Amino acid sequence: MPDAVVIGAGPNGLVAANVLADAGWSVEVLEAEEALGGAVRHDHGVDPDFTSDLFSAFYPLAAASPVLAALRLEEEGLVWSHAPQVLAHPLPDGRCAVLSRRLDETARSLEAFAPGDGRAWKELWRVWDTVRADILDALFTPFPPVRAGTRLALRLRAAGGLRLARTMVLPVRRLGEEEFSGEGGRLLLAGNALHADLAPEAAGSGGFGWIMSMLGQTYGFPVPVGGSGALTAALARRLTRRGGTVQCGQRVTEVVVREGRAVGVRTAGGRAVPARGAVLADVSAPALYGSLVAEEHLPRRLLDDLGRFQWDFATFKVDWALNGKVPWTCAEAADAGTVHLADGVDSLTRFASQIAMGRVPDEPFALFGQMTTADPSRSPRGTESAWAYTHVPQAVRGDAGDDGLTGAWDRREQEAFADRVEAQVERYAPGFRGLVRARRILAPPTLEGLDANLRGGAINGGTTALHQQLVFRPGPGTGRPETPVPRLYLASASAHPGGGVHGAPGANAARAALRHRRTAALSGVQNLLTRRDRRSRR
């Protein structure tokens, strides 16, 4: 009987298993799919000579994560690679905002939009550099982050205190307007905010856009050499070397609860897997509380809150094998691993508004990845392994374009919207379509079919909006990995701090399980000493 059973071999599940194994626990990981990794996988499905990431691709949060750093995955063969530039946001008029790991280069790019904007960017970075370590510690520990929060509060005095707190809750449109005279800096902040499901007018989008931009400035947007699955493989190798086991094709259908405690799981094949110490679930909160745990074991309030759980935007992704490099009108975009495609902040607002109204955007904001530019091993020399993803509504009520899209995402609708995404790329890179050797479409139902955690194509385990973050994630009064069922822990992106490949939800859940065992052992020792003391007095 293992000490712990982990449901799901995504990055959070594998991180949780590694943390427990490091503490001497025996661990068994059960994965529903036939492949490890959850949303961190690659394949050769677009073209045999091209490596394509199925889901996530660039990893600034992984590069910054103290959780992953502590696992020393480079000793397991993981190697990171960077594109010459982190990110570019070209405009139709030929201008281009560039985010570089070299601060002066980013500043020069923004200075070309408006005098003084380079200096303004450097000031945003100075504030970040002052509080960076404590923000990251606070971000990657359970809420409330007591020790990290105390250190951060002290740092905040030097960084402007309440002014920085105000910056963190500002809409990114307002933050950009306050900090920059030109459009370049505003575009970098707003485009990065829309890596999540935060509209330019959403409270907190300024803080998210600032953090993502500063992560890019400091750590870049690195990729694992050979494909995103190299990160998964390193986590799995490390776990195996420490005695943990991983089994694929084992879909868990029930968390077994006896006498009010989680004691193991049951699989779709009827196999019972007991757990001596804990069950950790790298699954979405709705899947855990709405399916795996019987309703009778959960508080009514939690179930009511679950009915209010909000998923993030659905995602639509297109992968390409290109016969040549992308012919960007703005030359600066050629060296960027990530390229944002939108005409300006107003276009981003229009895009987000269409999604909010349930309409498929007519001019989708595209995040475009140039994977061979970031890692030359991804495709033959002179070619490009590329992808773009954009967001669409979870529930489609209409089409803002002319294709009559309904959200059925049948073959016709997939092809029509993929053509719409390609048309957006073609506007900034005329001749792009002529380079396409092969393409693959991953519509929202396809993504969910490949990873059940990506409900309706949602990639962040739930909205990033303030009302479902911190103490509100996944529901009011939570914010920690412990669940109402003792010895059961939520270890997925539905838990604080949310989406992104950084391992924090998994590590937090594992540490909570370890704390519980230590506390129980201490309590047992104290009870034993008390009984002995009573006997000696007799």
Image (cartoon, helix red, strand yellow):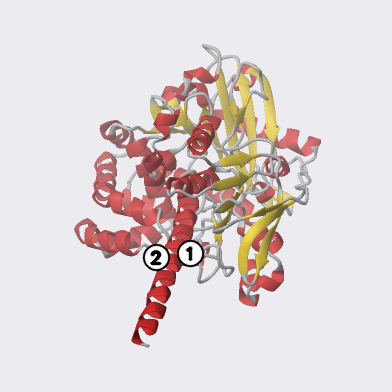
Which residue is painted at 53% across and 17% down in the image?
A: 325
Q: Are marks 2 and 1 in contact (CB under 8 Å)?
A: yes
Q: Earlier in the sequence, mark 2 or mark 1?
A: 2
Position of 62 with respect to 369 (left or right) is: left
Q: Which residue is mark 1?
A: 479
Judge whether residue 315 can be spotted in this image. Answer: yes
In this view of the protein, which residue sits in the foreground, 480 or 220?
480
Q: Which mark is residue 144?
A: 2
370 with respect to 110 (left or right): right
Which sits in the foreground, 283 or 334? 283
> Percent position (x, y) of residue 472?
51, 66
Above or below for 152 versus 478: above
> Disc 1 on helix, strand or loop?
loop
- Residue 128 drawn at (x, y percent): 29, 48
The three-letter code of the residue at mark 1 reads Gly
Q: Is residue 354 left or right of residue 336?
A: right
Residue type of the residue flagged with mark 2: Pro
